[in-house]
Image (cartoon, rainbow, N blue to C red):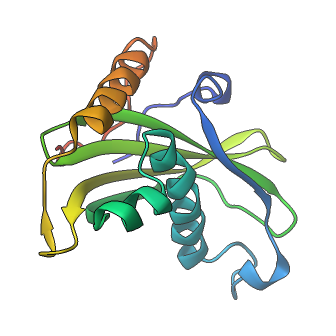
């Protein structure tokens, strides 16, 4: 199912976590960026995103915690080619005591298009027992503040419809 069109300018209102030029090794036999590299870039953008909520690598090391991705949905909208500059933005959609639901938007800045959507459910984890766990109150407050800001946008998030916290 094709998501609704979202103007690139609207995506630009979200925080940007990664901007990079696509290297030649990302090209596949079809002459565009291979699907595995989309996940690589979304993953790389995830680290500064969660650090903004206080979940840095140092925090996790000090508290024996981490994060587990539980579910993904990727929608490929436009080709990305070697040499294109892409930027990845995020929007936090909701949370439960242990999980967040968010989207990432890959914008091809070279071509001025939205290249891909990434939707994810991720959980906070207590790595001492390797189980999901509730977010600490200070982290939960940061998440709630981001959810409130993102909910105030004047466009609906193009969710796949089967995921949630």
Position of 10 with respect to 22 (left or right) is left
Q: Residue at x 33, y 53 (%)?
A: 120
Q: Residue 77 location in percent, x, y?
A: 55, 52
Outermost residue on the front side: it is 62
For the residue pair 62 and 42, the one nearer the viewer reads as 62
Q: Which quadrant of the figure contains the C terminus? A: top left
Outermost residue on the bottom side: it is 29
Position of 26 with respect to 158 (left or right) is right
Q: Residue 57 location in percent, x, y?
A: 48, 62
Position of 68 with respect to 145 (left or right) is left
Q: Residue at x 14, y 39 (%)?
A: 96
Q: Residue at x 57, y 28 (%)?
A: 14
Outermost residue on the right side: it is 83
Task: Determine the image quadrant of residue 155.
Answer: top left
Count numbered badges in the picture: 0
- In this rendering, is residue 150 above or below 70? above
Q: Residue 17 location in percent, x, y?
A: 62, 46
Task: Determine the image quadrant of residue 144.
Answer: top left
For the residue pair 31 and 8, the one nearer the viewer reads as 8
For the residue pair 61 and 149, the one nearer the viewer reads as 61
Q: Residue 139 location in percent, x, y?
A: 31, 38
For the residue pair 42 and 111, the one nearer the viewer reads as 42
- In this rendering, is residue 104 above or below 145? below
Task: Determine the image quadrant of residue 103.
Answer: top left
- In this rendering, is residue 82 above or below 95? below
Q: Residue at x 28, y 43 (%)?
A: 101
- In this rendering, is residue 102 above or below 46? above
């Amino acid at each position: 199912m094709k998501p609704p069109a979202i103007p690139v300018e609207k995506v630009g209102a979200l925080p940007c976590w990664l901007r990079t030029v696509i290297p030649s090794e990302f090209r596949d036999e079809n002459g565009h960026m291979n699907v595995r590299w989309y996940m690589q870039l979304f993953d790389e953008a995830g680290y500064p995103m969660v650090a903004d909520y206080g979940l840095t690598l140092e925090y996790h090391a000090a508290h024996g915690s981490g994060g587990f991705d539980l579910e993904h949905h990727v929608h490929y909208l436009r080709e990305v080619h070697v040499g294109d500059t892409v930027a990845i933005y995020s929007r936090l959609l909701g949370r439960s005591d242990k999980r967040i639901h968010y989207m990432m938007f890959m914008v091809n800045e070279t071509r001025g298009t939205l290249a891909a959507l990434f939707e994810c459910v991720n959980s906070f984890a207590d790595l001492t027992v390797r189980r999901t766990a509730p977010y600490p109150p200070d982290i939960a407050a940061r998440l709630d503040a981001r959810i409130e800001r993102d909910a105030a946008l004047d466009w609906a998030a193009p969710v796949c419809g089967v995921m949630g916290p």
